[in-house]
Image (spheres, coloured by chain):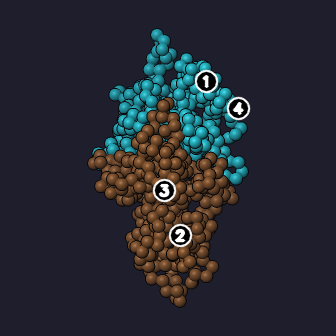
Chain colours: A cyan, B brown
Amino acid sequence: MSRTAVVALGGNAFTREDQRGSYAEQAHNARAMAQAVHALRRTGWQVVLVHGNGPQVGNLAIQQEEGADLVPALPLSALGAMTQGQLGSLITMSLHQTAHRERLEVATVVTHVEVSLDDPAFSAPAKPIGPFFAAAEATTMTETRGWTMAQDAGRGFRRVVPSPEPKSIVEAATIRRLVADGVIVVAAGGGGVPVVDDGHGFTGVDAVIDKDYAAQQLANQLGAEALVLVTGVAHVALDFGTPRQRLIREIDVDEADRHLADGQFPEGSMGPKVRAGIRFLRRGGSRVVITTPDYAASALRDVPGLDGRMGTRIIAEPTRPAAPEPHSAG
Amino acid sequence: MSRTAVVALGGNAFTREDQRGSYAEQAHNARAMAQAVHALRRTGWQVVLVHGNGPQVGNLAIQQEEGADLVPALPLSALGAMTQGQLGSLITMSLHQTAHRERLEVATVVTHVEVSLDDPAFSAPAKPIGPFFAAAEATTMTETRGWTMAQDAGRGFRRVVPSPEPKSIVEAATIRRLVADGVIVVAAGGGGVPVVDDGHGFTGVDAVIDKDYAAQQLANQLGAEALVLVTGVAHVALDFGTPRQRLIREIDVDEADRHLADGQFPEGSMGPKVRAGIRFLRRGGSRVVITTPDYAASALRDVPGLDGRMGTRIIAEPTRPAAPEPHSAG
C-alpha cells in the first residue's frame, strides 16, 4: 500500500526504564508518541502502529501472581491480549487529544499472530519480561512460580519466555481494509497474541513475539511502503562505543546484512531492528527507518541526498551518494 | 444495515456465578457462545458481538490491588480496555475453533463510548463489579481502598461504580465499515471504555457502561435490524415468580414500555434488557430478542405466527397474533 508506514514503538515508549508504570506516566509518554504519528500523517503517510508491551505485560504478570490466592491467574497469551486493549485504548485517546480537534478515525484491532510449535524458541525461552530481581529472589520465583529466569545485562534476573518467529498476521485482511479507508490502525501490540493452528482453529500459546518482527510481518502482508522502527537514539551506529564509532545515515540492505553478520548490532538492542528491516526490504518493502519518534517523519522524507534528514535509513537499492535518490515506487 | 444483528452477551457467559474465572472455564464457555453466533450466521445474519465484563473486570481489580505494593494499580477505564482485549481474543479464537475450518474474518475493535460528566450516575455509583464480600470485609475495603460498597441481592456486599448512559460509540464508523465487508466484529466489550470530551479530545473516566445499553447505542448507530440480548433464561416472564407468571413470546414496544413502567422487570435482571430493547426500536430498530444463546437464531426467524419459535421477541409494530408477520424491511 503506497504511502503506508508501519511504525513499531517499544513498550518502554510508554513506561520508561526509570518509571514504575503508573497510568499518568503512560498517558504522558503516549502523547509524545502521538505527536510523532501526526507528524507522519502531515507528510502524507498512512500510519499503522505496532506497540511493544514488555514493561506492561511484566507488571500484569506480577499482579496476576500476587492475586493468585483470590483469583485464578490467566495465561501469558491472555495477558498479552489485555495489554493490546490497554495500550491501544491509551494510544487512541492520545491521538485524539493531540489532533487539535481534527476528526480522526482510530481503531485498535486485537491481533493474533500464527507461530509454529516447531519453532526452536519453544525449547529455549529467551525473551525477558517484567522487572529485575536479585539472584536470591530469582531462585524463589523459579521454585514458587515455575518461571525460567535469566541474568539480563548485568542488572539482575528477569523471567524469560519463548519468542517464536511470526508466521502470519491473522487479522491482516481486516487491517488492510481499514488502512485503505484512511483509519489509523493500532495492531499486533506486544507482537500480537501468539497462536498455533492445532487443526481445529487457533489456540493461544505462552510466548512473546518480538514486536519488531511482528511489525515487519504485518508491513509485508499489508504491502506497506515503509517500516519505521522507533527507538531511543537518533541513529544506528557502527563500532558503537569505540573510538571508531560512526553514525549510519543511509545504508543499503546488503551492507546492513554484512554488518549484522559481523556482530555490529547486539541482539539486546539494534540487532532485531536491523534484522526486521532487512527482512522487510527483501520481501518487497521500499525503505526502513530506525530513529527516535521526533525524527521519524524527517527520516522518511523523499529529498535528494541526505541534507537535513535525520535518522538511520535502510534502502532496498545500493546507496549511490552522488546521485539523486530514485523516486519512490509509490 | 439489513440482516445485521448486534448480540449482547453477559460477562457471566464466560465466567458463571459458580466459577472462579479460570482460563479453562472461560474458554469452554466461549465455545458455547461461538456456536450460537455460527447458528445466527447460518440463518443469514451478520453479527456484531458486545460482551459484558463484570466478573472479569472485578477479578482484574482485585489483582491490581493485591499487587499494588509492587506495581501501580491502573484506573478502572484501563481495566475495562484490558478486558476488551482479553475477551475479544478469547471470542475470536473460539469462533475460529468452532467454524469447522471455514475461513472467517473476525476482528475485535477496542471501543470507546462517550458519556457526559453531567450524567447523574457520577454522583450515585450503582453498578456492582467484582466478587461478593461479607459486611466486615466490605467495611475494610471502603477504609483501605476507598471503594463504595453496596449490598447486592442478599448475597453480600460488592463494589459499586458509576454507570452513565452511553451517548455515542466513538468507533462506530469503523465497525460499520467492517460489518459491511462481512467481518464478524467484537466491539464495545464491557460496555466500552467510558470517555468524556474535555475540549481536547477524549479522556477515560472510572465508570462502567451497561453493556446492554452500549449494545443498543451501537445497534442504532450502525442502523442494525436486530438487537439480541442474550441471558440465562429462554423467555422474559410477566408476574415472575408468582402463581400468575406467564412467559412473553411476542410483545410490541408500547406494551413492553407499560410493563416496564409497572415494575414487571427488575433493574437487577430484565429491566435494563427490556429498556435497551425499547430504546432500540424507538430509534429505528426492527426487532429485539431476549433469550438464551441456544434460542437466539430461532427467535430471530421470520416465520408466520409464533409456532416453533423460542425466546421473547419485542417488535416495533403492535402485535396482531392472527395475521402473518410483515416482511422484514431488510
Between label 3 and label 1, give the one nearer the viewer.
3
Q: Chain of mark 3?
A: B
At mark 4, the secondary structure is: helix
Decide: marks 2, 1 in contact (CB < 8 A)?
A: no
Label 4 – label 3 distance at C-alpha: 49 Å
Q: Is residue A207 in sight in this rendering?
A: yes
Disc on the earlier residue, 3 or 2: 3
Residue at the spot x=44%, y=52% of the render? B150
Q: Are marks 1 and 4 on the same chain?
A: yes
- Asked if residue A102 is positioned above or below residue B224 in the image, the reply reads above
Amino acid beneath label 3 = Asp
Residue at the spot x=45%, y=30% of the render? A20
Q: Position of residue A39 (x, y in %)?
A: 35, 39
Residue pushed farthest top?
A243
Q: Chain of mark 4?
A: A
Residue to which mark 1 is pinned: A138
Left or right, A238 with respect to A200, comes to left
Q: Which mark is residue A123?
A: 4
Amino acid beneath label 1 = Ala
Q: Are marks 3 and 1 on the same chain?
A: no
At mark 1, the secondary structure is: helix
Disc on the earlier residue, 1 or 4: 4
Label 3 – label 1 distance at C-alpha: 43 Å
Residue to which mark 3 is pinned: B152
Q: Position of residue A2 (x, y in %)?
A: 45, 45
Amino acid beneath label 2 = Ile
